[in-house]
Image (tube, coloured by chain):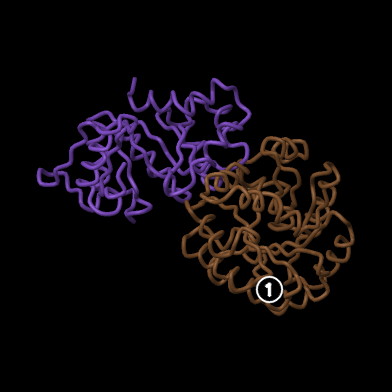
Amino acid sequence: MSLQGIYYDYGQGNEETLQSSRALPFIIPAATIDPRKFYARQKEGLSLEGFAALRVFPDLQGWPVDYAPFHKMLEKAASRQIPLIAPAMGPGKSTEMVRAAQASGLVVILNSVSYWTLSEALVLMAQYDGLHIGTDMLDSPDAIELVSDELGPERLVFGSNYPFTYFSGPLLNVQRSEIPETHKRLILRENALRILGIR
Amino acid sequence: MIIDAHAHCGKWFFPIFCESPRQVAGLCDRYEIEKAVFSSSRAITYDMESGNREVSQFIQTDSRFYAYVYLNPGEYDRSRREMQSYLSMPRFVGVKLHPSYSGEPANSKATLKLLETLPESKVVLVHTWGRDGVNQVCELATAFSAHHMIMGHMGGGAENEWRAGIEGALRCPNTYLEICGSVLHHDRIREAVGVVGSERIVFGSDMTLLSPAFALGQVLDSDIGKEDKRRILHDNAAGLFRFEG
């Protein structure tokens, strides 16, 4: 997805993302919305048509999860039946995020889960089948094995956070984990295709 | 092969279960780590003496394992005893300071006094976080110009923090940047190599808190020469710790 959508204007950013995905078919487009500008009326002009997911950045944009415009956004995503991709942030924030998404019936990929927030994510995953976690910051040495064994490899989705951070770290972390090759394939490919509805 | 200048043994208050020497050895196998220098998580977070005793036993289990003795300069007499107990052992290659946990800045009077008797052959690894942390290590490095100091996490995870680390290393020629962390911004290694040179950057993983995958990935992905990568992953630490072979 477009960085312009995160930092400047989500409408223009989303259009840029769609254009890129038309030109380069390997790009799966995710929309973003900045709830500081979202007011759920006609002029706001949000369309999720053509997008495979909605990705949000409260960490970069500085808005709280318990925020009426965000809750309206979730309703809109739920009506389109696309998953929500959201960051874990600090302790307690994942609980707020997942409960808000769960209330709208949204499937969630919680990314940037680290050793610091893994405990919270594991409890939430046990409580909500629609929750998956991204591997971009799943950085403790046995986290891939732990989540895979406890909750199943189908609950993990590869993420890199590139170009903010390096690509190969998260990739090596999955490739060199001590889980079956079939499970690595789920994490690196199949789970994302299933969740994003791509055949 | 890789030399890891920043590793830990012991338990964590997070869902991490890679604790036994056998599990840690397996992690070293997985990431082709030839040698690793450990400090005790127990010593840093809870009890210095029992933690240092734990790491001294841990390194006996595998010929690849070396150690830092953890010191809390705020506990001067106790830290002096720890230095005397362990630094004569050949596989204790340095000391570890963690100002965030101990509350004792790397440039405090107590720290400077404590390190007065540290042999020049022993390396100082300091958890270095933020501009203030970098400035403290620079002051320490200036006061002990014959010693080698490693700035753990190369100054921190935020852009202004690791850039401060690079600037600090440029100011102090007896410092090294160590590269582990949770947030590893793209291009930070290339920038560090461009400013400081690859000769003063060392690989660290922060295992067993973190997987070595992330620190390794940033070196492999960096747009720097093969020779630079070899220095960072192995050669610089081999020279610094006087490892032979």
User: Chain letter for purple?
Assistant: A
x and y, in percent, of residue A115 in the image: 56, 45
* Side (left or right) of A125 relative to B97: left
Image hue for chain B: brown
Q: Which residue is mark 1?
A: B141
User: Is residue A72 in view from this perspective?
Assistant: no
What number of labels is visible? 1
Where is B142 relative to A54, above or below?
Answer: below
x and y, in percent, of residue B149 in the image: 70, 66
Where is B137 relative to A137, above or below?
Answer: below
Q: Residues within 10 Å of mark 1 (few under 14, many from 20)?
A: many
Amino acid residing under circle 1: Ala
Camera-side residue of A93 and A172: A172
User: Is residue B59 in view from this perspective?
Assistant: yes
Which of the image's four quarters has the N terminus of chain A? top left
x and y, in percent, of residue B136 in the image: 62, 73
